[in-house]
Image: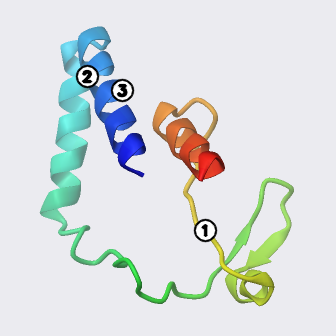
């Protein structure tokens, strides 16, 4: 995933050149708000057990983690939409592994 980190860094550099200052300030503010909430400390660590969940997929079907795990390992990725360049970089990196 080192390549993904490099791609994200390049994306950030390109966005910083293209986006208006106001948008970049909003991005920075939202990141700081997450840090202020200590979101990183409450996040699941590598190797920790992921809590079971039930969510709807894009076809409005209920998906349960415990059922998926019966077929083997599971990768959980949060995909906001095809419009999100970060999500697309992550999906591409997962496909390439």
Q: Residues within 10 Å of mark 2 (few under 14, many from 20)?
A: few
Q: Is residue 65 above or below residue 9?
A: below
Q: Quadrant of residue 12?
A: top left
Label 1 Cα crowd, 10 Å radius (few <14 / some 14-19 / many 20+): few
For label 1, the SS is: loop
> Of marks 3 and 1, which one's residue comes earlier in the chain?
3
Please give the name of the residue rendered at 61% of the width and 68% of the height, measured from the top-left corner.
Answer: 75
- Front position in the image: 77 or 26: 77
Say above or below: 40 vs 16: below
* Nearest to N terminus: mark 1 or mark 2: 2
Q: Which residue sits at x=18%, y=69%?
A: 38
> Residue 17, position in %: x, y?
25, 11
Q: Position of residue 51 (x, y in %)?
A: 53, 87
For residue 69, what is the image quadrant?
Answer: bottom right
Task: Where is residue 65? Give x, y as percent.
Answer: 68, 82
Disc 3, SS: helix
In this figure, which residue is indicated by the disc labeled 1?
Answer: 75
Residue 39: image quadrant is bottom left
**95 or 63, which lies in front?**
95
What separation in Å lies between label 1 and label 2 (alpha carbons)? Answer: 28 Å
Q: CA distance from mark 2 to mark 3?
A: 5 Å
Q: Secondary structure at mark 2?
A: helix
Q: Which residue is mark 3?
A: 11
Residue 48 is labelled as none
Q: Is residue 50 above or below residue 15?
A: below
Image point 34% across, 43% down: which residue? 5
Q: Are marks 2 and 3 in contact (CB under 8 Å)?
A: yes
**Label 3, label 1: how many angstroms apart (C-alpha)?**
24 Å
Compared across the picture, whether 3 is left or right of 56 comes to left
Q: Point out which mark residue 13 bears.
A: 2
């Amino acid at each position: 995933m080192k390549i993904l980190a490099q791609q994200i860094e390049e994306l950030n550099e390109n966005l910083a050149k293209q986006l208006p200052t106001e948008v970049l300030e909003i991005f920075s503010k939202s990141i700081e708000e997450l840090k202020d909430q200590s979101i990183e400390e409450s996040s699941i660590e590598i190797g920790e057990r992921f809590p079971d969940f039930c969510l709807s997929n894009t076809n409005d079907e209920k998906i349960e983690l415990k059922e998926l795990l019966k077929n083997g390992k599971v990768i959980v990725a949060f995909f906001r939409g095809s419009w999100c360049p970060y999500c697309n970089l992550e999906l591409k990196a997962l496909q390439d592994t």
